[in-house]
Amino acid sequence: MADTTPGITTGALARRLGVSPTTVRSWEQRYGIGPAIRADGKHRRWFPSDVAMLEEMCRLTASGIPPAEAARAARSDRPDSDGMAGDLPGRTASDADPSPGRRPVGGGGLPLGDVRQECRGLARAAVRLDAPAMETLLEQVISDYGLVTAWEEVMAPTLHAVGRKWESSNDRYVEVEHLLSWQVSTALRRAAIAAVGRPRTPVLLACVPSEPHTLPLEALAAGLSERGLATLMFGGAVPAEALDAAVRRCGPAAVVLWSQARATASHALARHVAGMTFGLRGARTTPLVLLAGPGWAGRTPDSGLQRPRGLREALDAISRVYGEPVPGSEH
C-alpha cells in the first residue's frame, strides 16, 4: 500500500537534517537521491521513506564516506513506504525499527530521545561541524517558535545530548560541544540585539563566583530583550565585590544569580544582594533576587529571594517587577 501521508517540504526536510535546502536539491540533482513519489506541482514532497533515506545519507557523509557512495548506499537501503502512514511527526522507520547491524539514525548517534525535528537537525549539523547550517537553523527556530520554546525544546536538549555523549565516549565530541555552544551563544546574542529594550533600569545578570556556565543566562537576556526589557550581562564567575559594586551603581529592580552546581551556590551572597538598598532617601528600594539554576535547589529561598523553575517562569517574574504584561495572563 502506498504511503498516504502528505509529506513535508524541502525546507522542512532541510531543517530536520541540519542542512540547507540548496544542499538537499543539490543531492537530488547530482546523485538522484530524490523523493520516491513525484507529487503534482512544482514543489517536492518528502515522505517518511524519503526522509529515512536522506537521514542515512547524512549519517554516512558525517562518517567520512564520499557523497556519491553514500547516496548509492542510502538509495539501496530506502525503506519500504508501506505501513508508514501512521508514523508520528518527527519519527521515521529507521528511528523506530533500525535494521540489524545498523545503528539508529538520530543526531549522529547522540542520545536525543523524543524531540522536535529541528533538534535532530541541529544535532546532525553539530556532529558534522557545519557552522553555517547551525546558524541558519538556530535563527529559524527562534523566528518560528520564539526564544523560550527555541531554548527549552531545541537548544538545551541538543546541548545536553552533546554533553552526555562527551561524558560517555572517552572525551570524544569535545569539538562538537565547543562549536555548538558558540553557535547557540551567538544566536542568543543576536536575538538580544535585535530586540532593543526600552530605556529603564536594566536587569542585572551574573553568575556567582566560581560559576563559569553562562549560556542559560544568555538565553534569559535574549528573552528579556524580546519582552522589551534591558539587561546588563556580567557573565561568568563574577567576584562578590564586583557584584556588590555593580548593584550599588545600577540600582536594578531585579538581579539574577546563576549557579549550575551546589558547590558554587552562595546563599550568603544572595541574601546580601537582596538586602542592599538604593535610591533617594525616604524612597529606597531593594532588588528582587532570582536564584536561577540547579545549584540553588534543595533549600527554601529566604524573603526577597525567588527560585524560578525555568526560563519562562523567570521571564514572567521579572516582567511583573517591571510592570510588564505577562504573556498568557488575563490580568
Image (cartoon, rainbow, N blue to C red):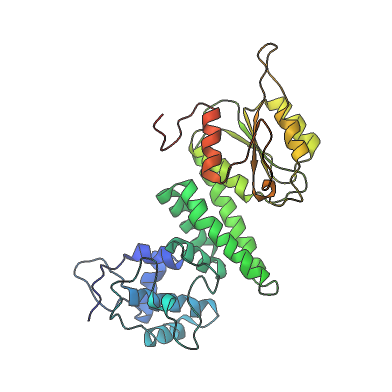
Query: Is 278 above or below relative to 181?
Result: above
Eyeballing the image, is 285 above or below 31? above
Residue 144 seen anywhere in this rendered image of the structure:
yes
Residue 323: image location, x then y, percent = 50, 26
Indicate the position of residue 285 as horizontal and vertical percent values. 66, 20
Q: Is residue 144 left or right of residue 309?
A: left
- Side (left or right) of 23 relative to 271: left
Question: Which residue is more in the foreground, 141 or 89?
Answer: 89
Q: Quadrant where the N terminus lies?
A: bottom left
> Residue at 50% across / 63% down in the picture?
122
Question: Which corner quadrant holds the C terminus?
Answer: top left
214 or 63, which lies in front? 214
The residue furthest top is 282
The answer to whether residue 193 is visible is no
- The image shows residue 228, relative to residue 41, as above or below, that is above
**Count of marks placed on residues:** 0
For this view, does 53 lie left or right of residue 213? left
Q: Nearer the viewer, residue 297 or 67?
A: 297
> In this view, which residue lies farthest toward the left?
40
The percent coordinates of residue 101 (x first, y second) are 50, 88
Task: Identify the image quadrant of residue 37.
Answer: bottom left
Task: Please indicate whether residue 17 sits to the left or right of residue 303 in the image.
Answer: left
Quarter of image, res 279:
top right
* Residue 163 position within the rendered picture, expressed as x and y whole percent measured from the top left: 63, 64
Res 73 → quadrant = bottom left
Task: Identify the residue shown where x is 58% and y is 65%.
Answer: 161
